[in-house]
Image (cartoon, helix red, strand yellow):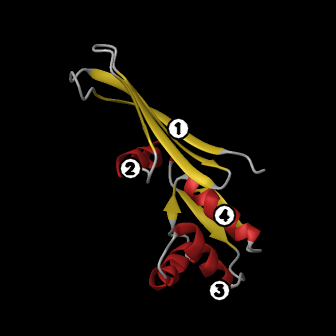
Amino acid sequence: MEPVVVECLTYRAECQDCGAGTTCSGVQALVNGSLTWDTEISCPSCGLRLAVCGGDLPAELRDRLLAEHGAVRLRVDQAASRAVAMRVLRNVLGLPLADVKSVLHEVVTGRYVGTMPEMERLARGLRAAGVDAVAART
């Protein structure tokens, strides 16, 4: 079993019930090949406690993770089979065939970035298919 990859953060926001300042925490993790996320809110003024998770990572939380931790690039062996890499990208990202070639171009040119859990998931998929790949901070 491969290690869990986690990025987390703490930030301030307004309570959705009373408007007071609250402390929130967010996390994205790569666990057993799957991406998970959650956000927790705790308001000291009104006592609201809320946890949200599941589905796609909300854009706001993703943007906060990228701002706090920095973008991660996927680096792949330039000599790797394009067909193998495209198959992995399509399977892992759930992309339609028409979009895979442009994503592969972004990966090969170093322009495809994301959070560490996102990029490590792709790197693991590529390595499992025999493509030398590494997720690295930019």
Q: Amino acid at mark 4?
A: Ala
Per the image, the residue denoted by label 3 is 83
Viewer can see residue 132: no
Per the image, the residue denoted by label 1 is 8
Per the image, the residue denoted by label 2 is 58
Q: Is residue 118 above or below residue 44?
A: below
* Mark 2 or mark 1: whose residue is earlier in sequence: 1
Q: Amino acid at mark 1?
A: Cys
State if disc 3 and disc 2 touch (CB < 8 Å): no
Viewer can see residue 5: yes
Q: Amino acid at mark 3?
A: Ala
Q: Residue at x 68, y 66 (%)?
A: 125
Q: Position of residue 1 (x, y in %)?
A: 78, 50
**In the visual, does 32 lie left or right of 23?**
right
Measure the alpha-carbon separation of dots 2 and 3. Answer: 31 Å
* Mark 2 or mark 3: whose residue is earlier in sequence: 2
